[in-house]
Structure formats: structure tokens, C-alpha cells
Image (cartoon, coloured by chain):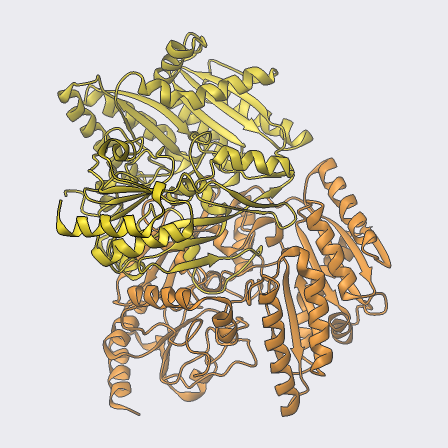
Chain colours: A orange, B yellow
Amino acid sequence: MSGTAEKALAALRAGLPEPVLLTDPDSVARFAHDDAEWAPYGKPLAVARTTSTDDVVAVVRICAELGIPVVPRGAGTGLSGGANAIDGCVLISLQGMDEILEVNPREQLAVVQPGVVNDDLRAACREHGAWYPPDPASSPWSTIGGNVATNAGGVCCVKYGVTRDYVLGLEAVVGNGDVVRLGRRTAKGVAGYDLCGLFVGSEGTLGVITEITVKLLPGLRAPERTVVGYFDSLVEAGEAVAAVAAAGVVPSALELLDRHCLKAVDEWKNMGLSAEANVLLLGRSDAPGAAGEQEVDALLRCFDAAGATWSARSTDEHEADALFAARRLAYPALERLGPVLTEDVCVPRAKVPEMLGRIEAAARRHDTRIANIAHAGDGNLHPLIITPPGDEEARLRAQRAFDDIVADAISLGGTVTGEHGVGLLKRKGLHAELSPAVIGMHQAVKSAVDPAGIFNPGKVFGDPDR
Amino acid sequence: MSGTAEKALAALRAGLPEPVLLTDPDSVARFAHDDAEWAPYGKPLAVARTTSTDDVVAVVRICAELGIPVVPRGAGTGLSGGANAIDGCVLISLQGMDEILEVNPREQLAVVQPGVVNDDLRAACREHGAWYPPDPASSPWSTIGGNVATNAGGVCCVKYGVTRDYVLGLEAVVGNGDVVRLGRRTAKGVAGYDLCGLFVGSEGTLGVITEITVKLLPGLRAPERTVVGYFDSLVEAGEAVAAVAAAGVVPSALELLDRHCLKAVDEWKNMGLSAEANVLLLGRSDAPGAAGEQEVDALLRCFDAAGATWSARSTDEHEADALFAARRLAYPALERLGPVLTEDVCVPRAKVPEMLGRIEAAARRHDTRIANIAHAGDGNLHPLIITPPGDEEARLRAQRAFDDIVADAISLGGTVTGEHGVGLLKRKGLHAELSPAVIGMHQAVKSAVDPAGIFNPGKVFGDPDR
């Protein structure tokens, strides 16, 4: 261990209360990576399970002085390696800071610590007659802090927007150990730069978020009507998605699952889905009354016109919920089959059919299995590349398919990441998507907020070849 | 004229096509300030009426090399002095860059040059069956570029959000003359920092915005139902506003006008409003069918419970539109009475009655006339302080009332500016609202994007005493 590392450990031991700091290798290793199975990770020096903003300040001050990298993490459900350990870093686990400090339906806001689990916040809001919409598939496990750091999306985002749209303010510890309050508690506010928004989606590279004020919608969520469409091909399902956008319909969900996902869920949970359809589209409308009926009709018309082999509105609420549960289970079901390399491209809605066709072509070209889940209504596709465990050749082919899909998305006017973040896996794609001048702006802004360069160095816009 | 100024003029003459550059003092003076009658302004060296991004690049390169301040401006309808000339600056007028480049209802976006007038974009979108919601009172004159630079609000923001919520991407010329494209065209995207969002509301301090991609909502705007409430006092009207928030109703408009505004409009347009009410609340609902009826009922219940002397749903669409037209005319009507010092505080919704009471107290305490218009449903209040032309004593009293109102808003958990921006008028308030650490972050971010410090120096977070 280097002298600097020893100095850091001594200072951390002196500066933090007893149970906060973990240094034995086995305990530390449990925090070393997120859920991106393909992303590399290093060996942390220590893990600080902070219990307060003061703890975070203590860690940041010590690390800034000694030039030790700091990697903040929530529940570790990320899918891009953004929270993966860097060799010799201090990981700050914010999971223990999990208090809901305020739910205020009158002002339509809630204040939480970063470790609050998404579903827990949503349940607390429900009790107060309010709704926090962002609903990533990881909502039973992922934390609001992690959601904010990655600007997480979800199923209802197609109508209600992403995490960014619900972050009013936050408290963060920045590079010199200062605690700053950014944003506001009022409905509107333009006092200075949107530094709060700058932190949303910054993937731990600008500081450690220690408190979050989120916007709520008043009232409970309206009940939803569900429609189901079966399709023979991905491209036909994609045509249905493009038709929905062209018709000007904004569903409250429009999700796609292909036969690989349906089969994996069947094999695990025996739901009998894959016998029925090659590709499943699930649409929902939460518009009230006649407007909702009209939206459902419009969705079904779009499904049928694109060549659905079967389509219907679901009259059984339990059946509808089961289908969405299957959607949520698709990712863990596929993980059972081997390491999953997750993509997260987002393309213009009209390009969804073409992009789905290109994904299939990449699978064929590189002889690799690609399953597809998609927040299709957003154009946000999740091709999931699955390789047999231990097959190095298959891994190389998978990586080539990944790169082709990224290039295809960019060439169709899309982005390499719709909601998961860049982390480690999409740095090459980011450099392909953004101009050198824009990368330069990122570096300059990063240095402005984190002059010592301690926060998650090398992630997001770091050199992808290092 | 200094040697640097002469060099700059020579370079501008050489670098720009003939009719772009204005240097004769009379022509230049027309561009020297925005609509904030109380804000100081300097004498520009020249005005560049740019017609292309290339023109903007030419100006920025020359000014960066010579250290000449650059002040971008749209239509000059700002209310904080953000676009006011700095002595020796080059003003870039973007009004001539007024092309609507694309309206794409399928992808729910439009691409415009910065000089496009807000109402013109809205009309173009309507023709394509789509809706661009942000509707500042200045919409017949103000430009999208100016709206983006100030993150403008408006009447329907209480339900549909502000300009920021509709900016997907932009092109800008930054401090070294680089042209950067920030943001995206897709529904979602998290590739790197939200630098696009950082520019929204940056009031010309980070660069010159040369193209904007905005998000549209599909379909035409739904028809609205209007309710009207008369109140004896500002505080009672404020109670009604707080009650609407507490009831969890989200109207599509909730506007307040007090007797000073009603009288000024009457004196100008003879609408007979001030005979009826001391304070007028205008609410709207655009929810469809029965949901809309329920919202209207709820608004009326809130009005009545707070002590409305009269309340009713408007059954006459023309009458309803006339009332909102009066709301839009209130500001110019008051301007006819003398120089208006405009405030733009925003407080938590539950604090609206108390804040309105404090505004009245400030008026009494400082023996000054304060009219009130408000986007009341957002807690965004516009106390308008009016002084008799040429009365220097009254100006001093007005300034003291302004300062007290800013302090009151901050002490109630509010912000000094909800939608107009800081500009020159609210710099002292900004320094009271934000901590020195946050001001330091602003300065660092500004230097990162504008290393030569040429863009609108001294505005927003500049030293208010200089």
C-alpha cells in the first residue's frame, strides 16, 4: 500500500465514526461494482457507508487533499458501470442515508436522502395522496440518489418525463468539501444557472448528492387501460410504435418485449407468453373517461395497421399487471442465461422500425443472441446481448455487435444512452456522438466543479481506451 | 475611442457583410436596453445584426481576441436589464435570424433560429397540429432565443412547465468561437452533462444561442373552461390560490390582477373592470369532459371558501378571452403611468397570501404605489412598483420597497426571480439567495465555458455594487 493510501486510511479512521468505514477486502469487494456485468472494476481502498452529510464532507476533504478518487454509489443497480470501483478509490455508499425527510402534497414536493428506495418514496407519496412518477424497472431496489445521478427513465416516462423533470433541488458535497444547496423549493425559479440540473445525470463525476427535493404530482395516479398486441416481427412492432407517434397519441406506457425475453420469462416463471407471440407490445392509457377510450382505440388501430396478428384491450386488471410484471422480470430472466451486455440507445420515434431491423441484422452478422426490451414509445431500445458463460469468442462477437448498434443509433440521429448513463460501457459511443468541442466543454465544467479531479475520474467522458 | 475599440471595429467591418454592422450612434442607441426601465445601460461600440451562425462566430472570435464584451439580445422585451448594453460592448441582435427551420409533429419537435417570435412559432405548430406551450405575456413580441436565455415562464406554466421543459437541444457559439451542438432530438437522452439545460436561463453569459430544438406536444390545445373570482383583498385572493394548491387541483391558468392593474387597463381600454372587483382571480381548466367540470367546481369552491365576493364560470368565450387579454395588457397599461420597477419573486404556494400581505405592507411602509399581477398558481408574483415620472424621492422609496419584497420572498423560502431572470436588477437579491459557495460555482462554470469572460460580463452574479 502506498504512503498516500496509508495516510488516507489513517485520516478516514480518525475522521469517521466507527461502523461507517469498511476496509477488510471481503466487505469492500461487495461494493466494487454495479449491475453492468461486462464493465471492468478495480479494487477500492475502502468503503464509507456514510450516515450524514458530515460523513460525506469528511471523506471528500480527505480525498481531495490526498488526490484519492471518490466513487459515490446507491444500490448498485446501474447498468453501465458508472458506480464501479476505481483502483485505490474510496467508495461512498449512500444506501444508509435513507430517510424520507418530508412529503408535502400542498407544495407538491418531497425531500429525501439519497439512499431512499424509489418504490419506498412512491409508497410514501401515495399515503399523502401524491405521485412521484419516475418508475425505472429497478424501482423496487434502486435509490433516488442513483436515479438522479443517472437521470433514470422508466415505463411511464413516455408520458410523464424522466427523473430530471422531477428534481427541484439538491444538496451536494463538491470538490473542495463545500456543501452546496442547488435549485429551489418553489414551482418556478431562474436565479442563476441550473446547476441542480447539471448534477442530474452527471453520474457521480461532479460531487456527492446528499439530499434531493423532488416534485410530485397531486392526487393518486389515475387507473390505466391496457392494450396488448402480438406481432410476428420486431420491425412490424416497430411500425406500430412509429404509427402511435404519428397519430399524436401519448400513451402512459408503450413497452416492447421480443421472443427472447418472453421465452426467458416463461422458462423462469412459466407464464406461457412465448407460445402466443413473437413480439409483444404493451400499451397503456391513463386519460380519464372518454379520452381514455379514444386513446385505447387509437393504439389498437395503430397495432392492427402495422400487422398485429392479434390485438385487444385487456379487460382483466390482473392479467394486465402480470404482463407488465413480465416486462419488469425480463432483465433478471435473461441474466440467468449468461452475462448480459446491455445497450440503451434512443432513436427518433419514426426510426424505431429501422433501428429494430438493424439490431436484428447486427445479431445475424455477428452470430450473437440479442434480446430486445424497449421503452418503445420513447424510441428507447434495450438490445440485450447474451453470451454463453465463459465463451471468449462469443464475447468478442458481442462487443462487435454492441459497437455496430451504437453506430447505427448515431447514424439514425439517435443517442448512445437514453436513460442508463454512459458509465464505462458507452464512453466510446459518447466520443462518437459528441464533438471534440463539446467533450472539451465537459472537461472544463468538470474541472470547474471538481478542481482536484477526484469524483469518478475516467467515467463518462474519460478516454475510452484507458 | 481606444486603440482596441478601433481595432475591433476594423476587424468587424472586414469580417461581416455590409448591412450587418451598425456603428452610427443613433442606430446603435435603439438596441442599448431592454424593457427594464429602471436598469442602467451603457454605450455599445457597435451592433451586429447577424444573419447566420457564421456572422456570430466572426463577432465572437474578434471580441474574444480583443477582450470586447459581447451582449446577445432578442426582441428586447426582457424585464431585468439582462440584454442591456455594457459600455464599449458589441451587441449581437439575433432578431433577423428568424427562420422556422422544421416543424415535425411526428417527432414532436421544432427547430428554429433564435429570432423567431414566440407567437409565430406557436402559430406554425398549430398549422401542423402540434402545440408549443410556453406563453410569456410578451409572446406577440418576444423571441424564442430570448425566452430560452431567460427560461421564460407564462400563463399556462402552472400546468405545462416553463421554457426549460421544452428545450431539447441547441446550437451555440461559445467563448473561443467554437460552434457547439448541445442536447438531442430524441425523446430521451443522457449522453453527458445537461449542457443544453445549463444554457437555458443563462441570460447570455455563456455564449450566443444560434439555433434551438424545442419539444412540442401533439395535437391542438384543448379548449379551456374559465372561472372568475372577485375578492375584496389581495390576502383573500391569495388564500384562494393556496386553497387550490391544497386541494391538489392543477389549473391550466391561475392569474391574479389587483385594483391598480384593473384601473390602469380601464383607463386605457375602458373595459369597466375596476368597478366590479378589487382583486380578480382568473382560473382555467383544459381537462377534458367531466374531469374539466370537476376542476372548475373545485376552483369555484376554493374561491368561495376564501371569501370571494362573487365567483362564476364564464359561459361566454369572448368574455373569458377579454379577461385574459386584460391580464396581458396590464403591464403596458401600468407603464403609461410612469417608470415601472418590476419584481418577479416566487414563493411556495401556501405562502402566497402572506407574501401578498407583505407586499401591501411594503407599499404602505415606503409610501409607494405597488400594483400586482401574478401567475398566482405558481406562487410567481409580479409586484410592479410605479413612481411618478421625475420624482427622485419616490424612486428611492420604490427601491427600498423592492429590496424589502426581495428579502421577504427569501425569508418565506422563495426566490428573487421566478421567470424574468436576474439581469442587472436582481443581482443583490441573487447574492442574498445563494451562498458564497454556490456563487463561486457559478463563476467557475462561467470561466469554464467563457474563458475570456466576454459574454455579458457583470450580469446575473456579477458584483451588484459595481
Q: How many marks?
A: 0
- Residue at image position (48%, 36%) is B118
Q: Quadrant of residue B44?
A: top left
Give the image location of residue B83, x and y in percent. 30, 40
Q: Using the rendered image of the protein, determine whether residue A339 is visible from the camera's viewpoint.
A: no
Q: Is residue A240 above or below residue A332?
A: above
Q: Quadrant of residue A137?
A: bottom right
Q: Using the rendered image of the protein, determine whether residue B148 is visible from the camera's viewpoint.
A: yes
Give the image location of residue A377, x and y in percent. 66, 55
Q: Quadrant of the N terminus of chain A?
A: bottom left
Q: Is residue B108 above or below residue B296?
A: below
Front one among A384 and A431: A431
In this rendering, position of residue A174 left or right of residue B159: left
Q: Quadrant of the C terminus of chain A?
A: bottom left
Q: Is residue B287 above or below residue A216?
A: above
Front one among A117 and A324: A324
Q: Is residue A73 above or below residue B292?
A: below
- Residue at image position (45%, 40%) is B144
Give the image location of residue A455, x and y in percent. 35, 72
- Residue at image position (80%, 66%) is A233
Give the image location of residue A423, x and y in percent. 48, 72
Front one among B357 and B19: B19
In this rendering, position of residue B405 left or right of residue A377: left
